[in-house]
Amino acid sequence: MSSSPTALTGFAAELREHALAFPEATEDSPWGERAFKVRGKAFVFLGGKEKVSFSVKLPRTGLQALALPFAEPTHYGLGKHGWVTITLPKRVSRLLKEQCWAWVKESYIAIAPAKLGALVTGKSSS
């Protein structure tokens, strides 16, 4: 682990809590940013200083997310693999918050082993 990032407040703190609620989710801080992982594989990168920004893998809803003015393909070549970076406005509505939770869940399911994903979806992994 590298240097730990500063304490989170507001929506960023809620996003952290939400990500860590998934089965076997852990937090790491590579490159001074937060990464939420399942079995060593990242499903959310959380960054941003002035505004909350996070990246998630969206195999199902990525194209719809990219149509939003505050979304873009994730840099470093991750965008071509379905990763989307969301940079939120200062005020986050209840509806947008719920959408963020759905994106985090979709990313977790995309990255997690099938048995763990099934715990979240309620579907059998067999």
Image (tube, grey):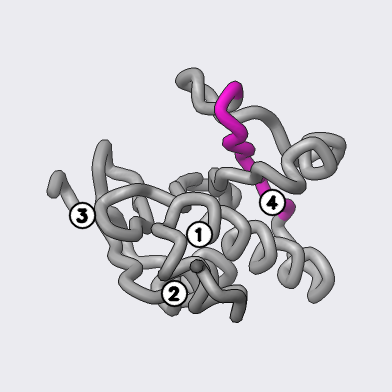
Kind of residue indicated by mark 3: Ser
Ranked by sequence position, the earlier of labels 2 and 3 is: 3
Q: For the residue labelled by badge 2, is the local secondary structure a helix, a strand or a loop?
A: loop
Q: Is residue 10 left or right of residue 68?
A: left
Kind of residue indicated by mark 4: Leu
Kind of residue indicated by mark 2: Phe
Q: Which residue is mark 1?
A: 108
Q: Which residue is mark 3?
A: 4
Question: How far is disc 2 from disc 3 in space, using C-alphas?
Answer: 22 Å
**Front label number (1 vs 4):** 1
Residue at 64%, 45% in the rendered image? 58
Question: How far is disc 1 from disc 2 in space, using C-alphas?
Answer: 8 Å
**Numbered circle sitting on residue 22:** 2
Choose between 53 and 10: the one closer to the eye: 53
Q: Is residue 89 left or right of residue 42?
A: right
Residue at 27%, 58% in the rendered image? 39
Quadrant assignment, res 37: bottom left
Whether the residues at callouts 1 and 2 have beta carbons within 8 Å, the answer is yes
Residue at 14%, 45% in the rendered image? 2
10 Å neighbourhood of mark 3: few (<14), some, or many (≥20)?
few
Ranked by sequence position, the earlier of labels 4 and 2 is: 2
Whether the residues at callouts 2 and 3 have beta carbons within 8 Å, the answer is no
Ranked by sequence position, the earlier of labels 1 and 2 is: 2
Question: How far is disc 1 from disc 4 in space, using C-alphas?
Answer: 20 Å
Over which residues does the magenta segment extend? 80-89
Question: How far is disc 3 from disc 4 in space, using C-alphas?
Answer: 23 Å
Q: Which residue is mark 4?
A: 88
**Front label number (4 vs 2):** 2
On screen, residue 5 above or below 81: below
